Structures are given as structure tokens and as C-alpha cells.
Image: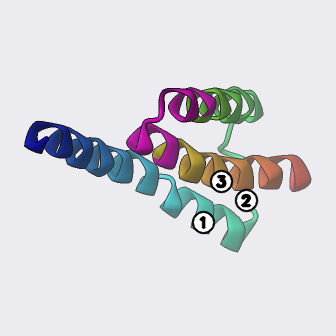
């Protein structure tokens, strides 16, 4: 049981690190509404991929995968919406 808990903690820490990395870009995009340096196609593909990772995480019952991708999808969606709206 301790082994599983350590694996979950490592997964949650990894999820936190990669997910929180989107926060500065989301904040900057919201504040400046400047999306000129952001690729629309990349964010469309990335957001779709994140949705699939979220579905996968839910299907396998993985808290780290589900949580990370749910939060990342929110940040990526915000950036994508701003990219489309303020083209």
C-alpha cells in the first residue's frame, strides 16, 4: 500500500509541475489579450489531446492523470478562446 501511495504522490507532483506551467501564459494572455505569438493550430491540437488524456485518465481511474489534464484543459481552453477571439 505504501508503494501505491508513493506512486500516486509522484504522479500528483508531476501533474502539478506540468499543469502549473500553463498558468503564466494564461495570465499573460488574459491581461494583454496578445495572442500573436501563439499558434492556433497547436492550441487546437493540444486542447483536443488534453481532452483525450482526461478521458483516458477517467477511464483508467487515475487521479493524477485526470486531475492534471482537467486543469490543463481549462488553462489551454482559455488561451485557445483568447486566440480565436483576439486574432
Q: Quadrant of the N terminus?
A: top left
Mark 1–mark 2 CB contact (< 8 Å): yes
* Vertical position of residue 35 compared to residue 45: above or below: below
Residue 10 appears in the picture as rendered: yes
- At x 33% / y 51%, what residue is drawn? 17
Q: Count neighbours of disc 3 (C-alpha within 10 A) and say few if under 14, some if 14 to 19, many if 20 or more.
A: some
Q: What label does residue 54 carry, if any?
A: none
Name the residue tied to disc 1.
28
Between the C-alphas of marks 1 and 2, the distance is 8 Å
Identify the main secondary structure in magenta: helix
Task: Find out whether residue 64 is within the magenta segment.
Answer: yes
Between the C-alphas of marks 1 and 3, the distance is 15 Å
Where's residue 39, x and y in %?
A: 70, 35
Between the C-alphas of marks 2 and 3, the distance is 18 Å
Q: Secondary structure at mark 3?
A: helix
Residue 35 appears in the picture as rendered: no
Highlighted magenta segment, given as a residue range: 55-67
* Vertical position of residue 51 compared to residue 32: above or below: above
Q: What label does residue 34 carry, if any?
A: 2
In-image side of 73 versus 13 (left or right): right
Name the residue tied to disc 3.
74
- At x 44% / y 38%, what residue is drawn? 65
Q: Secondary structure at mark 1?
A: helix
Of badges 1 and 3, the one in the foreground is 3
Amino acid at each position: 500500500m505504501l508503494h501505491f501511495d508513493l506512486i500516486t504522490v509522484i504522479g500528483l507532483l508531476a501533474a502539478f509541475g506540468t499543469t502549473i506551467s500553463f498558468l503564466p501564459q494564461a495570465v499573460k494572455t488574459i491581461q494583454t489579450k496578445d495572442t500573436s505569438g501563439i499558434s492556433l493550430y497547436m492550441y487546437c491540437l493540444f486542447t483536443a489531446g488534453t481532452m483525450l488524456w482526461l478521458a483516458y485518465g477517467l477511464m483508467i481511474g487515475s487521479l493524477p492523470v485526470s486531475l492534471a489534464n482537467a486543469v490543463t484543459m481549462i488553462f489551454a481552453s482559455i488561451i485557445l478562446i483568447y486566440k480565436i477571439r483576439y486574432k
